Amino acid sequence: MTNQQLFQPYDLGPITLANRIVMAPLTRNRAGAGLVPGELAATYYAQRATAGLLITEATQVSAQAQGYQDTPGIYTQAQIDGWRKVTDAVHAKGGLIFVQLWHVGRISHVDLLPDGAAPVAPSAIRAESKTFVNNGFSDVSEPRALDVGEIKDIIEDFRKAAANAIAAGFDGVEIHGANGYLLEQFLKDGANRRTDAYGGSVGNRARLLLEVAAAVKDEIGAERTGVRISPVSPANAISCSDPPPQYDYLVEQLDTLGVVYLHVVEGATGGPRDISPFDYASLRRRFKNTYIGNNGYDLELASSQLAEGRADLFAFGRPFIANPDLVARLKTGTPLSPLIPETLYGGGAEGYTDYPSTTAVSN
């Protein structure tokens, strides 16, 4: 199998992707008043619409779900209308786009939450982590443990957000169950010390993510529902004493639900792939639908993993920021432009929509 297989169409449920390259979710902190994505966001995503699939930056399902300054939501009509401009712009370019739905849980700050409320979590355990608030990085606030009634409300928030996503014109949604945020906080025993139906056993700790996935599936269809996980990533100070049985069980249940894809961060998010031993092939065997590999992929690694059948699609993150024409650059061997770190988070067009495409590609 040659590199060119990466650039062939691929059927993802009811939609056909132009290629096997996915733009991974990338937080950019540029939402406007009311946490509404603006015209710049529409331009940004449309510029990258040659990806087989775009997955948006993480987008909160409620006001309580916010953990960083100027990240967009999808729980008000204004936010839905803002996202509609994005999806229209992407579709006009022939692209396909899913929105990533998240609740940050304990990775938040009182200054970001309604009435200065404490962040919520499975257990009242503060993370040794920081968030972006008041135009700088600060330690996250002390969380409080959710009660069972509140957990049901959060499941409903995800369901409503999925419905809002379809109303906004998205082709589907990705449930964010990775990187130390709320759903993963329930999954992993380093953050979850509960003794009720949502804590303790492997099955209990997986319950919330599975109930969210079921609610979203019932609302918009399994064929438009994806899930992202990160079995061994220590992002946001998350930890698990024994990941393999936790994730084998979770993935078996997601397979039973029939969600359209499993998006797996292999290794440490944005870091080394070999941070901890883990058998990703075990997840691949347990999941019959599309497997998206994520973390540190380049053309060579993606091609080899595809040839070996280890993944179906390949998510590229930061390379897409500085290279809106990344697919064409990979296909033609054109050198990649470097990222400007200072413009990653917050600001306007600089470092967001002003990265150029190559002349040969743009013509």
Image: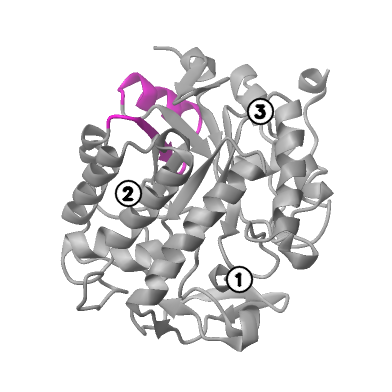
Q: CA distance from mark 3 to mark 2?
A: 33 Å
Q: Is residue 224 above or below residue 342?
A: above
Q: Is residue 56 visible?
A: no
Residue 63's label in the rendered image is 1
Q: Which residues are magenta?
A: 288-309
Q: Nearer the viewer, residue 101 or 275?
A: 101
Circle 1 — which element? helix
The residue under the point 27% across, 38% down is 255
Under mark 2, the amino acid is: Asp
Foreground disc of the pair 1, 2: 1
Q: CA distance from mark 1 to mark 2?
A: 36 Å
Expressed as whole percent of the image width and height from the top left, the position of residue 241 reads: 20, 66
Q: Neighbour class for label 1 at 10 Å: few (<14), some, many (≥20)?
A: some
Q: Nearer the viewer, residue 103 or 43?
A: 103
Does residue 46 appear left or right of residue 189 in this picture?
Answer: right
Q: Is residue 229 above or below residue 65?
A: above
Foreground disc of the pair 3, 2: 3
Expressed as whole percent of the image width and height from the top left, the position of residue 124 reads: 36, 85
Residue 95's label in the rendered image is 3
The residue under the point 78% across, 30% down is 357
Under mark 1, the amino acid is: Ala
Foreground disc of the pair 1, 3: 1
Residue 209's label in the rendered image is none
The residue under the point 80% across, 52% down is 38
Residue pointed to by mark 2: 274
Does residue 162 appear left or right of residue 136 in this picture?
Answer: left
- Which quadrant of the rendered structure holds the N terminus? top left
- Give yes or no for contact between labels 1 and 2 (Cβ–Cβ under 8 Å): no
Expressed as whole percent of the image width and height from the top left, the position of residue 130 reads: 54, 76
Under mark 3, the amino acid is: Gly
